[in-house]
């Protein structure tokens, strides 16, 4: 009997060793081959593919070896892209789940560069499977060097909004709006207060709503009682920096997105969406509205940011009509 027990322990030990060897081999062998199609010359696509493979190779090595940093080269990505990827990595560890990825190259408006969407990634800090498995966007310079990497809006919503534009100018602007919203979202995930300081207007109006505890003599028995707090940009960013410091990770998701152009100005857009905020210390959901000025397309500015709890009906959520003078 003792011999059988020893034999079973030996088998279990061998099984565990085999499991960890297999895990290590799989980690070392996991890499992603990229094949980009259409719209640009073959030599540019080849450069894009090589750069994407090189950057994700480093991401995969850091992920599977549990490294806290990523070593990236300016041969493959711009300095700004490297800083952003490293900042995102410091708060959200991820890797591409595909070993082979075929994707179409998109040209960005105004000759701003090139883009590849729908790169499936796994985030280690996601609270749910939906949080863990998301898509990312790679942006490239016109000569094929990576210029940005950020989290994508849900694919079905992106194309639905993009295709709902009227006229060439509006379609081009909608592509800019959606790209800007994706970049803003990712800035929160990478805790990038510097970027957010740049995109909020110095005169930005920031409003946050809080549901009041219902009492028996509430004057609003059918609806919901909400208290609103107004902040300046400086006040909002000061509080946000504290939030960034106090959380090891932040994962923001956008859903139910609606984009509207202002009736009085072709340069002003309103974006309304459902925001899910998940961090190491706090989680909530609510309605987010952004009023964005695109007069300078290279540096869009957020004029208004409002947040309201989900208890507020969708038809009562703030929108462009509520801020006609800004």
Image: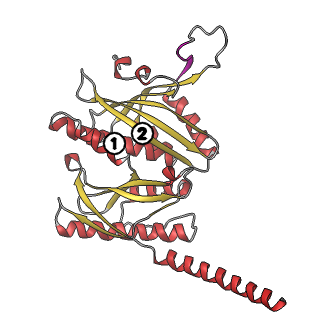
Residue 174 is left or right of residue 217, and the answer is left
Foreground pick, 308 / 67: 308
**Most extreme residue toward the right, as rendered?**
2
Could you say which quadrant of the image residue 118 lies in? bottom left
- State the residue at coordinates (26%, 32%): 295
Foreground pick, 286 / 241: 286
Quadrant containing the N terminus in the rendered view: bottom right
- State the residue at coordinates (29%, 29%): 260
Secondary structure of the residue carrying tag 2 is strand
Asked which colour scheme the image uses, the reply is secondary structure
Query: Can the viewer see residue 192 in this picture?
Result: no
- Callouts 2 and 1 close, C-beta under 8 Å: yes
Spot occupied by residue 306 in the image (x, y as percentages of width and height): 46, 27
Q: Which residues are magenta?
A: 222-230
Query: Can the viewer see residue 261 in this picture?
Result: yes
Residue 127 is left or right of residue 57, and the answer is right
Q: Which residue is mark 1?
A: 157
- State the residue at coordinates (53%, 55%): 92
- State the residue at coordinates (39%, 45%): 183
Q: Is residue 173 above or below residue 135?
A: above
Spot occupied by residue 298 in the image (x, y as percentages of width and height): 29, 42
Say whether residue 228 is magenta.
yes
C-alpha distance separating marks 2 and 1: 8 Å
Residue 255 — which label?
A: 2
Spot occupied by residue 10 in the image (x, y as percentages of width and height): 73, 87
């Amino acid at each position: 009997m003792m011999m059988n027990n020893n034999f079973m322990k030996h088998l279990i030990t061998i099984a565990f060793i085999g499991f960890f060897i297999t895990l290590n081999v799989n980690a070392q062998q996991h890499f992603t081959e990229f094949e980009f199609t259409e719209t640009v010359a073959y030599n540019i696509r080849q450069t894009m593919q090589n750069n994407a493979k090189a950057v994700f190779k480093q991401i995969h090595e850091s992920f599977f070896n549990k490294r806290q940093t990523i070593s990236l080269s300016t041969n493959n990505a711009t300095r700004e892209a490297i800083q952003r990827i490293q900042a995102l990595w410091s708060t959200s560890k991820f890797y591409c789940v595909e070993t082979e990825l075929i994707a179409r190259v998109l040209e960005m408006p105004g000759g701003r560069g090139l883009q590849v969407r729908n790169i499936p990634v796994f985030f280690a800090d996601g609270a749910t499977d939906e949080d863990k498995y998301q898509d990312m966007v790679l942006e490239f310079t016109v000569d094929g060097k990576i210029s940005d990497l950020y989290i994508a809006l849900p694919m079905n919503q992106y194309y639905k909004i993009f295709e709902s534009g009227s006229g060439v100018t509006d379609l081009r602007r909608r592509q800019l709006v959606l790209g800007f919203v994706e970049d803003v979202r990712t800035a929160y995930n990478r805790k990038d207060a510097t970027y957010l300081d740049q995109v909020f207007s110095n005169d930005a109006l920031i409003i946050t709503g809080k549901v009041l505890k219902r009492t028996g003599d509430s004057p609003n028995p059918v609806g919901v009682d909400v208290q609103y707090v107004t902040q300046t940009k400086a006040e909002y960013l000061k509080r946000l920096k504290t939030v960034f410091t106090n959380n090891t990770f932040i994962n923001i998701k956008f859903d139910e997105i609606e984009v509207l152009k202002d009736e009085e100005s072709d340069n002003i857009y309103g974006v309304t969406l459902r925001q899910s905020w998940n961090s190491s210390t706090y989680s909530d959901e609510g309605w987010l509205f952004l009023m964005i000025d695109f007069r300078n397309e290279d540096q869009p500015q957020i004029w208004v940011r409002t947040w309201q709890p989900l208890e507020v009906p969708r038809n009562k959520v703030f929108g462009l009509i509520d801020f006609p003078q800004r």
